[in-house]
Image (tube, rainbow, N blue to C red):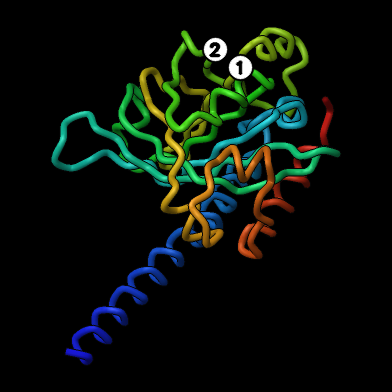
Amino acid sequence: MNRIIIALLSMSAMATAKSATKAMERIEDARVAFQEIMDAGDQSIPLDLLKKAHCIAIVPGLKKAGLIAGAKYGKGVLMCRQTGGGWTGPATVRMEGGSFGLQIAAGEVDVILLVMNESGAKKLMKSEFTLGASAGAMAGPLGRTVQAETDAYMRAQILGYSRSRGVFGGAVFEGATLREDLDDNNDIYGKRLSNEEILLQRKAAPPGAARSLVNTLNRYSVWEK
């Protein structure tokens, strides 16, 4: 009996360690996706908007579900500004369902959402949030700067982008839901913290695995509140 209990405990510990490893790897996947997009020059996210964003969600490798027509699913990270302008987090998110435009048909898609004001940031702190035009979301512009259009885009609460097979552009994710992932937060921080507790209340320090992502975001987005 003792051997069975020990074996079960060992299997449980291995499963927990594997889950934690995947959650940590996802942080690095998010960094790589963001870096590759910013390396695209005039087809990247405008620096003007990055510098003014309150939060950013990065979902690398969003997939279509094989058995359910039209279903999409992906996991990623959510980062927000802290006092002084640097980035805090990451918290974790799951993106599900909705209409993502034509690029999703090509297979896996990298998704980036810029949250442009405090109202949009508060919405993303909810346990579940539905994206779309009614929520103040719109497709984001491309280019190093968006001088003539910045005011129009700054009125949006959330700007959406997607990349598939090297093609990157603005995208509207109508009807897609963004949920906090308490299990992944637990894998990263060792506690089932909500996204609000991580990003706003700062109840846990960022893990070492997030340092590279934080540094990459800081490099492209000096705070311009």
Q: Residue at x 75, y 41 (%)?
A: 220
**Which residue in the structure is indicated by mark 1?**
157
Q: Are marks 2 and 1 in contact (CB under 8 Å)?
A: yes
Q: Residue furthest front?
A: 1
Q: Residue furthest bottom?
A: 3
Q: Residue at x 24, y 79 (%)?
A: 8
Q: Secondary structure at mark 2?
A: loop
Kind of residue indicated by mark 1: Gln
Q: Residue at x 72, y 44 (%)?
A: 87
Residue 97 figure quarter: top left
Q: Nearer the viewer, residue 87 or 152?
A: 87
Neighbor class of circle 2 (other Cα within 10 Å; few <14, some 14-19, many 20+) is some
Number of numbered callouts drawn? 2
Residue 57, position in %: x, y? 55, 37
Residue 7, position in %: x, y? 24, 85
- With 80 as the anchor, is 71 left or right in this view? left
Q: Residue furthest left?
A: 67
- With 27 as the anchor, is 145 left or right in this view? right
Q: Secondary structure at mark 1?
A: loop
Residue 99, position in %: x, y? 33, 22
Kind of residue indicated by mark 2: Gly
Residue 46, position in %: x, y? 69, 28
**Which residue in the structure is indicated by mark 2?**
136
- With 112 as the anchor, is 22 left or right in this view? left
